[in-house]
Amino acid sequence: MTRVILTATAVLCCASLDLRAETVRDRLWIWGRPAGVYNNTHFRPMGLRSTVEPVAGAEEMGIKNMTFIATGDLGPLDDYYRPFERLDRVYWSLVAAGGGTSQAAREAAYGLAEKHKNVVGFILDDFFHEPSGGNAADPGPEKPFRASLTPAELRAIRQRSVRGGRVPLMCVIYTAQVKPGARAHLAEVDQICLWTWRPPDLKNLEANFTALERLAPDKQLFLGCYMFNFSNNKPLPVPLMQKQVELGYQWLRSGRIQGIIFLSTGTVGAGLEAVDWTRQWIRTHGDQPLPAAKVTSLIGPSMSRGS
């Protein structure tokens, strides 16, 4: 196997960056979106509003890491990114909300990563063009899934040098998409984050996650946790928020997942109880140390550490 040198900034294990024990907070991420992104869509039926900028939203939640989904006119990207320099780690989107992508958008993301050492990975949002609501055990298409990029295109992205090395490529998958049709594409990414689009399907979260482990046994997995019911445009009940977060906490401590991603900064400041509950949970648990033997460096399976 060809040895691939990974830049130090792409190694996402804090223990490799300093001598302190890694904490829960080190493995918490927030889904970054431009300010006010939901005000005229998902929030409009309830009259909710948020004007919180993405980095301010992360800081209000006590989170240091962000997966940012770049949509709309952000203006000059270097200017827009300036607040992001306060974050520890950023994954920037190569595929944005709704599965949109272009060579120009991807090149802009690569350019950003070359300039900023805290851009340590890339994210593929809404990557599979298959139904998102449902469960792994539900019937689904037998043929390979439709997706925003081909396996060959993903392979080329993964091999692209960033700051002289490689950074991880993460793919979004919904519980209904945890099926063999996703396998060819998942083989070409380093990390996968699992999302439950419909709140009633959270009752099957354990089974859906186990199915993903079986489908992609060699990939690093993350748990995505919605803080709002986007499928019905209404608040998420706190007991459902608690269920997914507490499961994620167990899996993080046992090493089954490498991180929890909360969605999103666009919900911060809208007066949502699930967001308030999550903020308090982070305050309570964020600084707890993680068992050193249970967490691994967040690097792709074919990567080796180097200078």
Image: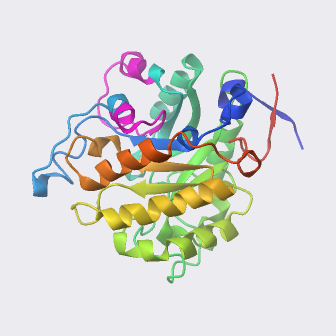
Q: Position of residue 37 (x, y in %)?
A: 25, 41
Q: Camera-side residue: 75 or 90? A: 90
Image coords of residue 60 (percent x, y): 34, 34
Say which residue appears at 47% left-offset and 20% top-offset. Answer: 85
Q: Which image quadrant: the N terminus?
A: top right
Q: Residue at x 50, y 47 (%)?
A: 285
| Residue 124: image location, x then y, percent | 51, 47
Which residue range is magenta in the image?
A: 57-84
Is 82 covered by the magenta stretch?
A: yes
Instruction: Tell me if I can see residue 304 in this picture.
Output: yes
Q: Tell me if 139 is positioned left or right of 181 in this view.
A: left
Q: Left of 56 or right of it: where is 125?
A: right
- Residue at image x 33%, y 52%? 277
Q: Residue 20's quadrant in the figure?
A: top right
Q: Residue at point 31% right, 22% down? A: 75
Q: Which image quarter holds the C terminus?
A: top right
Q: Is residue 146 above or below residue 154?
A: below
